[in-house]
Image (cartoon, rainbow, N blue to C red):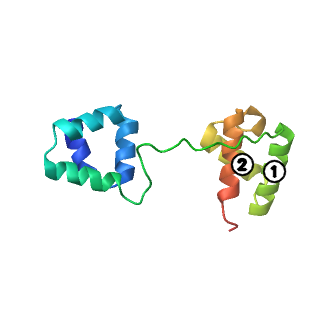
Amino acid sequence: MKVSEIVLNCSTKNDLIKLLATTGASEPEIEWLRENYLSSAERAHLELIRKSTQGNLFNQPEPELEIVEYKLSEIIAATDGEMKRLGWGKERGRQHLMETYGKKSRIHLTNSELLEFWDYLKSRDVP
């Protein structure tokens, strides 16, 4: 499918964000396409999407990221607490690690996997 067809299939700001992320199309390419290739009705459609209430896709400042540092022992203790809150025993935790990461212990997880596991536990409701 041509980029122009993909642009015209967008109906929300999130669609435009996905377009930029997945097709490799850049903001200048979309702008060139809008100015030189699309009809006035198609330009109006694109402009409505760009001005939608889902946030400003173009010219949006980068969000500031908060850097939080944890010690490994703190994360392990936090996952212990979350597993206890959920009523998970060691066996249930190992089962999840094997199913999700193919690893049977938290010590075998990478730092990002361990943080992902902790986030997963925090997001779960108590059964």
Amino acid on which disc 2 is placed: Trp
Q: Quadrant of the C terminus?
A: bottom right
Look at the numbered discs 2 and 1 and tell me whether their residues touch, using CB distance below 8 Å.
Answer: yes
Residue 113: % across, % down: 67, 38
Residue 11 in sight here: no
Image location (x, y in percent) of residue 5:
20, 42
| Residue lying at 32% horizontally and 33% vertically, measured from the top left | 28
Q: Is residue 26 left or right of residue 92?
A: left
* Residue 88 x/y as whole percent: 75, 57
Left or right position of 111 against 4: right
* Residue matched to label 2: 118
**Quadrant housing residue 99:** top right
- The answer to whether 83 appears left or right of 27 in the picture is right
At mark 2, the secondary structure is helix
Viewer-side residue, 71 vs 67: 67
- Name which of mark 2 and mark 1 comes first in the sequence: 1
Q: Which mark is residue 78?
A: 1
Residues packed near mark 1 inside 10 Å, few (<14), some (14 to 19) or many (20 plus): some
Query: Mark 2 to mark 1: distance in Å?
Result: 7 Å
Q: Is residue 79 visible?
A: yes
Q: Position of residue 65 (x, y in %)?
A: 65, 42
- Say which amino acid is labelled 1: Ala
